[in-house]
Every structure is written in structure tokens, then in C-alpha cells.
Amino acid sequence: MKICCIGAGYVGGPTMAMIAKQCPQISVHVVDLNQTRIDAWNSDSLPIYEPGLDAVVREARGRNLQFSTNVDEAIAAADMIFISVNTPTKTFGMGAGRAANLEFIEKCARQIARVSVGHKIVVEKSTLPVRTAEAVKLILGNASSDASFDVLSNPEFLAEGTAIQDLLEPDRVLIGGESQAAIQALADVYSHWVPAERILTTNLWSSELSKLTANAFLAQRVSSINSISALCEATGADVDEVARAIGTDSRIGPKFLKSSVGFGGSCFQKDILNLVYLCEHFGLREVAAYWEQVVSMNDYQKRRFAQNIVKTLFNTVSNKKLAIWGWAFKKDTNDTRESAAIYVCRDLLLEHARLHVYDPRVPESQIRADLEHVLQDENGEISPNKAALLQNVTIADSCEQAADTAHAIAVLTEWDEFRELDFERIYQRMPQPAFVFDGRNILDRTRLETIGFEIHSIGRCHQRRRLADT
Ligand code: NAD
Ligand code: UGA
């Protein structure tokens, strides 16, 4: 059996490495147009940071796992072709800002149609709007050769930072399709390590829609608890206590109730907006408005965090040094797509703050590219005034360096290393009062307050307000 995967990104790379590791008899070829990315997959320095990924790749690469840019060759040789390319939000034309841009999917389908001979199983691994398989089938059905195809939907549910564990022991593998033989062929791949009862099969459309729905429900939980965090700050309740109290109800459950500066990542916002667009397309305005609010609440949470910093620092951060701890959208990944840090820092730069940013995994070039992108106007240009703001950004080598002489520290990613620092020393090197804005509620608040910090957490009254209350 030969598998090809088009797209060597955060999904294609780890999922195929896991299949290759678990199924030594299957040959897995991952292809991408991006030569730099492929070179990195073939090197000791993989293009994505994911705990445990190195070992999985090392075990299979060169045995039954290869990475290359030979897309045609890999498609032609494969029995099963996974499409795992990006499906970002459209930035132009019809549906701009909401619909998924499916141009990469269509290109893949056309390329598969062009080079295939014999029978192929084509698997949608990318997250797609419901009924995309219809278009894929239509394109494949018009292949000039006498090739034949079955199309399956097999969405991926891994989360970055825990991808290897998620792939090793998935809650479920979902396969949607029409042909029982094709569904069985894909189920046979997963059944090398996934128990049969965790392999769910549905029709194509249920599978496509389940992926968008799962992300929408997960993001909705985060927005729900974040909405309550604002009420906690206003009333004296503690959002982590509320989360614990409601999470013990087995009908609610404890996961995805961690209040934060806002969810990020390449998918939650993109997939909800896609869902909103689909609902509008089908005339379901109330349903669209319901889901759109999950994204609006997230925007509010990011904006509120930046505004709280400005207000607390006596209504001005102009020319003040602020330490930014964390840039990735969550810990244990180098991915920064839609990270809350980008939007919080944009707002602070517009208030003329001087930012000193430290992240253990994100390189300086990425941080600068993210900020440039978010300061651009709709024509993709950056005005001289905004370009000048970028000079107020310095990349630090450590938390301590970022915080040295800073008026405040803002924690934007929950990296473990931020918890255990010499906060006494950090405090002594900051002007007083020294502020901490913990956007992840990971720091030991009592300890920091004892040292002398004024700490502002998400969903909790800060000390000044508590003292005023008593
Ligand atoms: P990515 O941007 O990291 O990777 C996509 C890759 O596809 C890129 O390297 C790009 O060069 C390549 N590509 C695009 N068009 C191509 C073509 N025609 N031929 C060859 N290569 C091509 O994206 P990702 O994060 O891996 O996401 C891929 C899909 O999986 C998306 O639909 C996403 O919504 C979904 N998804 C992502 C995650 C995640 O954690 N990132 C989880 C589940 C599902
Ligand atoms: C998410 C889903 O969890 C995956 O199942 C899905 O496959 C993936 O999207 C996708 O389709 O791309 P991911 O975005 O990698 O995975 O990471 P999550 O752990 O879901 O976190 C997303 C964001 O929500 C992060 O910014 C995280 O910090 C935030 N979050 C998460 C919270 O603020 N609170 C929580 O309780 C949980």
C-alpha cells in the first residue's frame, strides 16, 4: 500500500509521520510545493515544533516515510492520496473575511485528476466547508485518463502542542464516505493502532460538518468562560473557581474552561467564520449570528486585555517599556497564527508603548512579520507612521531581559518556564509600582503580591480593588 499526502504542514507532517511509524509496511510520501519546508522535514531541524515529533519522524524517515516536492510522481504512485493543504479565510472577493479559500484544494483535485491512472482513494484531511467533496468528485470525475476515484472525508482533530499524543490515542477517527470498500481501506490503516470502537464512520457531509462543528463548540466554550471572566472582574468572583465549580458537573466537564487573553490558532476563528458563511449561504441568519458572536467575544477579550493595561498604567503607556512574555498562540508550539499576542501588541504599539518580547520557540523574524501584517492597511501597505511603531519592538533572549526596567509584564502564552522564575530579582529591576498582567492565569498570585507586584489576572479582581472593597 502506498500513501501520498499533499501538504507538509502542521497536519500533513505529524499525521503522516504517525501513520508511517505505526504501519511500517505502508510507504508514505509527503509532498509540498514549498522546498524550504521539505528541506526542513529532511533535516534535523523540523519546520514545526511539536513535543515528541522528532522521535516519530526519526524512526520512520528513510524507512517508509519520505518528504519531497515531487508532487506528480507521488500522486501517480499512490493508492491513497490525502489532501492536507491550507484552507485559510478568503481575503478577497465573494465571502472575503468569512468563506474558506478553496483554491489550494481545487488545484490538488485537478492535479490528482491530471496525473492519476488506475483506482485511487482521495481523502480530504484539510478542514472544509460541508459539501466540498461534491466539487472534488466532480473535478476527479472529469479526469482525462480512465482513472477512477473514491472520495473520503477524514478530518483531523489533533491540537498543536499535543499532536503526537492526540494522534497516538485519538478520542476518535472520523471517516465519511460513500464506498464501503474505500472506508474500510482507510479504517484498516488506522486500525493498526486505533481501537475499532474509536473509528467512526458517517456519510460524507456529516463528516465534513462535524469538523467545523467540533471546532465551533470548543471555541464557544472558551468564549463562554471568557465572557464570564469580565463579569468576575466586575463582581469579585474568581473565574478559575467558577470554572472548577461548573466543570465538576459531569454534563459540562472540566476541559476547555480555562479563561485566557483569547483563543488563537489557525483554525478556531477561520472555521467558525466559515460556518457563519455557510449558514448565511443557506439563509440561516439567526444561526450565523449565533456563531459569529463566539468570534466577537474573542475579539472583545483581546481588546479588553490591552485596554486594561493602558488604563491601569495611569492611562498612558506611551514610551513605557512593557515586557511581553510569549508570542505563540499556546504553549508547546512555534505556531503564531492568530495568536492573541499579535493583537494585544498591535493595540499597545498604537498607544506608543515600547515592547520587549520574549518567546522560547518563536523566532524574531516571525514576530516582526506578524506585527507588520497586522499593521497593514487593506491594500497590504504599511503607512510610515505605523512602520515607525515597529521600531518600538525589541526581541529579548529571556524573560528577565524583557522585564529589565519594564513598567509591566504581560503574560500572553502559558509556557511552563514562565512559572518558575526569580521574581524577587525581576521585581527589583522594575520601576515601582511594578505590574503583572497575567493573560493566562499561570503565575502564583499570592507569591507575586507578597513580593510587591500589582498583579492583574483574567477574571479576578486585582489587589487594589480588593483592598478598596474591605
Ligand atoms: P499549513 O499551512 O501548515 O500546511 C499546508 C501546506 O500545504 C503548506 O506547506 C503549503 O505549502 C502546502 N500546499 C498548499 N497547496 C499545495 C499544493 N497545491 N501542492 C502541494 N502543497 C501545497 O496548514 P495546516 O495547519 O497543516 O492545516 C492544513 C489543513 O488542516 C487546514 O485545512 C486546517 O484547517 C486543517 N487542520 C489544521 C490543524 C492544525 O492544528 N494546524 C488541525 C486540524 C485540522
Ligand atoms: C484546535 C482543536 O482543539 C483541535 O481539535 C483541532 O483539530 C484544531 O483546533 C484545528 O482544527 O486546527 P489548536 O488550535 O491547535 O486545536 O489548540 P487548542 O488547544 O484547541 O487551543 C486553541 C486556542 O484556545 C489556544 O489559543 C488556547 O490557548 C485557547 N484555549 C484553549 C483557551 O484559551 N482556553 C482553553 O480552555 C482551551
Image (tube, rainbow, N blue to C red):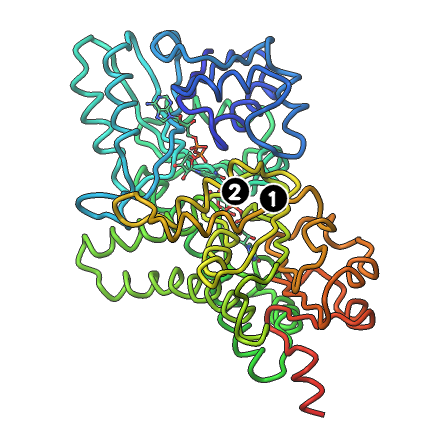
* Residues tagged 2 and 1 counted as in contact (Cβ below 8 A): yes
Query: In this picture, is 311 found above or below 339?
Result: below
Q: Which residue is mark 2?
A: 367
Amino acid at dot 2: Ile
- Could you say which is closer to the camera, residue 49 or residue 433? 433
- Is 27 placed left or right of 442 in the picture? left
Q: Quadrant of the C terminus?
A: bottom right
Report which quarter residue 62 is drawn in: top right
Name the spot of residue 48 as percent of width and height, x first: 56, 30
Mark 2 to mark 1 CA distance (whole Å): 8 Å
Q: Position of residue 239 (x, y in %)?
A: 61, 72
Disc sitting over residue 75 in the figure = none
At x 53% / y 67%, what residue is drawn? 225
Quarter of the image holding residue 237? bottom right
Mark 1 neighbour density, 10 Å: few (under 14) some (14–19) many (20 or more)? some
Quarter of the image where one finds residue 164? top right
Query: Which of the pair 158/435 is nearer the observer?
Result: 435
Residue type (three-letter) at the residue carrying disc 1: Ile
In the rendered view, tell whether residue 397 sits above or below residue 180.
below
Is 247 on the left or on the right of 223, as rendered? right
Q: Secondary structure at mark 1?
A: strand
Q: Secondary structure at mark 2?
A: helix
Relative horizontal placement of residue 88, taking residue 415 as reference (left or right): left
Left or right of residue 155: residue 206? left
Residue located at (79% from left, 53% from top): 420
**Of callouts 2 and 1, the N-terminal one:** 2
Return the residue at label 1: 395
Location of residue 327 in the rendering, given as x and y in whole percent from the top left corner: 57, 47
Instruction: Return the x and y of residue 223 as percentages of the image width and height.
Output: 47, 64
